[in-house]
Each structure stands twice: as structure tokens, then as C-alpha cells.
Image (tube, rainbow, N blue to C red):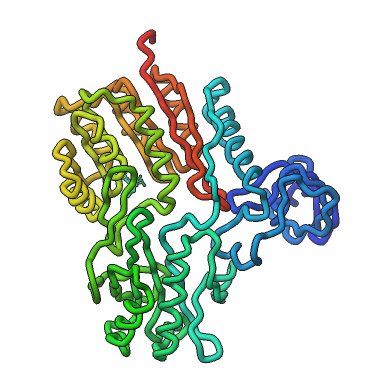
Amino acid sequence: MSRTLPVNKNDYIDVIFEDLTHDGAGVAKVEGYPLFVPNGLPGEKAKVKIIKVNKSYGIGRLIELYEPSPYRVEIPSNEKNKYGGCQLEHISYEGQLKYKENQVRQVLARIGKLEDVAVHPIIGMNNPWHYRNKAQVPVAEKDGKLIAGFFKPRSHEIVDTNESLIQIAEVNKAVQTVKEICSKLGIPAYREETHQGVLRHIMARYGNQTGELMVVIITKTADIPHKNKMLEEIALRLPKVKSIVHNVNSKRTNVILGDKTTVLWGNEFIYDYIGDVKFAISALSFYQVNPVQTKVLYDKALEYADLTGNEKVIDAYCGIGTISLFLAQKANKVFGVEIVPEAIEDAKRNAVLNGMGNVEFAVGEAEVVIPKWYKEGNAADVLVVDPPRKGCDEALLQTILDMKPKKVVYVSCNPATLARDLRILEDGGYKTVDVQPVDMFPQTTHVEAVAKIIFNEGN
Ligand code: SAH
């Protein structure tokens, strides 16, 4: 017999929530045993029903709220938005910011043993709605019409959603308009169960500074019925459209984009600016989704890099070179490294577009390319890293400790791996002097932060 758990299925118990999970569920502890309860907020006392018990955690349902949190708000529109990834929309924006800032502090202390580091108040948005410049929306048919929206959690059912509250209005309008046009023309939706039909997803991207719109039609088939009429209507009804692209994905897969991409109308790229730097964005380009906060984040990274114009800078995990080009405005030379070859093609194009001759880009793993550069005698004065959620590879951290750049600027989308990596750098003689959380994804649980780390000459 395994050890008895403090709760049983179908029990009703009273709890106080202490924390939130990554999905935005409330976390309560019963004799140390964690219970995850959707819709519970930290500080709230509630009656919950236990609906599932696993060895290491249980799941409950909120039955009655005794004391609502002062940060609890009415859900702005309707439940639908939640399916679109707005896990925190039942928390006031003030509450969301407080939660994210605390999370950075707590994780740095717990995992990084960095109790004394200066974590600055999080920088939020003035308007934390309608900020996303991109949408990729699955399409289905209902009652003879096309619908497009989000999947219900743990299901394949699509909820028709005309207005996502986190997408820029032009992006919402583009998706809705293309859906209406295709529906009117009788273009059939793709059906997952039978792998038949045509239209899989509608994607829209918007250059917030330029007002340029791109529409991407993703289909299972190489042909789109009534294609010319469709293009004509889209161009007519969406005057901001500069590019209409067709992507064919004929596989049985959850991956949205397929291998074949062709421009049907207009240009291959739309353009956007972050600060003074111009970017060309194709249908497949990775590009930050919150243009307003991206500028805030990069400005902070640039401030922390504290460049005088003489420095050699390495930008690891550089994507399409957004941070690299931002830094190149103030550095002597910037070297960007990124694993995805297409992103490096974009990065090179963007360097030319901005007439920046002091940037070079290399394809490869940061943990392989940077040690190689170092062995060849190429060290950096400032090293910037912006790794994916799993953080920096150990080999890269070791190279930083060998190379000893004066400054490291760490842009992080996961406080836990940031804390782990900062501890390694601290043990190797670096000191974390500033940490600035920036809210890149309001209404969601994503937490972004940028840290300034300097080499401690005294060590
Ligand atoms: N700095 C960019 C992108 C950051 S996202 C921006 O601000 O837009 C993280 C990037 O790291 C992705 O582009 C991903 O493709 C890349 N990446 C993931 N693992 C990598 C590795 N081991 N070496 C280099 N790049 C990697």
C-alpha cells in the first residue's frame, strides 16, 4: 500500500490559495500536498471539491469563494478569451504585475540564492489589451458556415471568436474578414478527423509602426477554389493588406505551417520598426508579438549593455537579429548566433535594410559557435543572451566564465532558468547588479526579465 494522501476524491475541504501554476490555476497545500484548482487566486479562502488525486498532487474544483482576492475582476468579455491563452484575465492588471514581479523575486531567491539582488518594479503596459501583432487561427465549419477561433481546452472543438481581446484590432479584423470571404465563396474548411477539405488556418501579421498587414492562407490542398475572387475581395475589404501568402500543409499534424509557401498577391514581406531599426517580416519569420513592450525590453537591454561605441558584442540566440541590430547602433561590432538558418537569412537581410555594416551573423548552436570563436581568439566585451525557456547551455556558461566579458546582459522568458544560470555565473566571479521584469504578455502567465551581470574584478 502506498502512503495515504491527506485528501480523497470527492472530499469537500476548505483551503487558502498560496500561489498560481503556470496555467494560472490556484495552488493550495494540504499538509504539504499540492492541490491545483482552476480559478483560485493567491490569498483567497475557498471551499473546493477534490476531483482527482495523483501521487504527488491533486486537482480540485472551486465550489465556494469565502473571500475574493482584492485583485479579482469580472472577466472582461466572456469565457472564450480564456481559450485564447488569457490565463490571468480574472486578475486585475495591477494584480498580474504584482504576481509576476513577486515571482521573479521569489525564484531568484529560492533557486538562485540571490536574496539581495535589485529586482526593479516590473514595467507593465499602459493598455494591457490588444497588443499582439499576430494571430494564427484554426478554421472549421458549423451549420454550413466557416468558423474560426480557439480550441476548447482538452478538446478539438473550435469556438468561433471574432474578437480576441489581446490581439491588435487590425489583426482581429483581418481574420474575421478572411473567414467571411472564404465562407461566402464556399471554400471548405479542413476536417481533422477525415483529413479532407481545404482551409486549415488563417494567419494575420501586422506592422504596428507601418500599418502594413499580411494575410497567410494555410490550406491542405495546393489549390484554393475561387482563389482569384478571394484575393480580389481580401484586397478590397482590407485596405492595409500589403501581402497575401499561401502556405500548403498537406500533412496530418498539429503543426500549423507546412513546407510550401508562395506569395499570391503583393509583397513577400511586410515591414515594421522597433525604435529606429527596420525589420522585414515574412510569413515564416519569427518576430516578437508585442511590439510596444519589445521596444521597452530592448531599450533596457541596451541600457544594461552600457555601450560607448568601442565594444565588441556577441548576441547569442539572436533570432532574426532584432537585439543584435539594436545593439549595433551603439557598438563597434556585433556578432549574432542563432540555430535556425532561415532566421539568420532574415537577420542578414535586416542588417542590409538598415545599412548596418558592423554586424555579422552565424548559424549554429550558441554553445558550439561561441567556444569556437573564443578558442580562435575572438572574445567579447559584452555578451547578450536571450535563450529559450530551458535557459543557457552549460557549455556556453562555462565559455562565459573563461572569456570573462565585462558585462553579460541576460534576457529571459523563464525566471527559473534565469535564476539557475545566474547562480552559475555568480559562483564563477560575476555579480548580478540589476534585474528588470518587463510584462511582454499581459493577461497570460508568461514572465520576461532582463538582468545585468558584471565581472567582479575583486574575485
Ligand atoms: N533574441 C531574439 C530571439 C529570442 S528567442 C529576439 O529577441 O527576437 C530564442 C532563440 O534562440 C530562437 O530564435 C531559437 O531558434 C534560438 N535557439 C534555440 N536554441 C539555440 C541554441 N542552442 N543556439 C542558438 N540559438 C538557439
Relative side of 3 to 371, left or right: right
Instruction: Place residue 411 in its image quadrant.
Output: top left
Q: Nearer the viewer, residue 263 or 48?
A: 263
Q: Is residue 429 left or right of residue 280?
A: right
Number of numbered discs overlaid on the protein picture: 0
Which residue is painted at 37% across and 73% down in the image? 238
Q: x and y percent of residue 275 in the render?
A: 33, 43
Answer with the quarter of the image where residue 202 lies: bottom left
Identify the residue at horizontal 51%, vertical 91% (top origin): 144
Give the quadrant of the C terminus.
top left
Q: Using the rendered image of the protein, determine whether residue 58 is visible from the camera's viewpoint.
A: no
Q: Position of residue 377 (x, y in %)?
A: 15, 25
Q: Position of residue 185 (x, y in %)?
A: 39, 90
Residue farthest top in this picture: 458
Say if 186 sits above or below 293 in the image: below
Depth check, front residue: 443 or 107: 443
Residue 45 appears in the rendering: yes
Residue 261's spot in the image, x, y percent? 25, 71
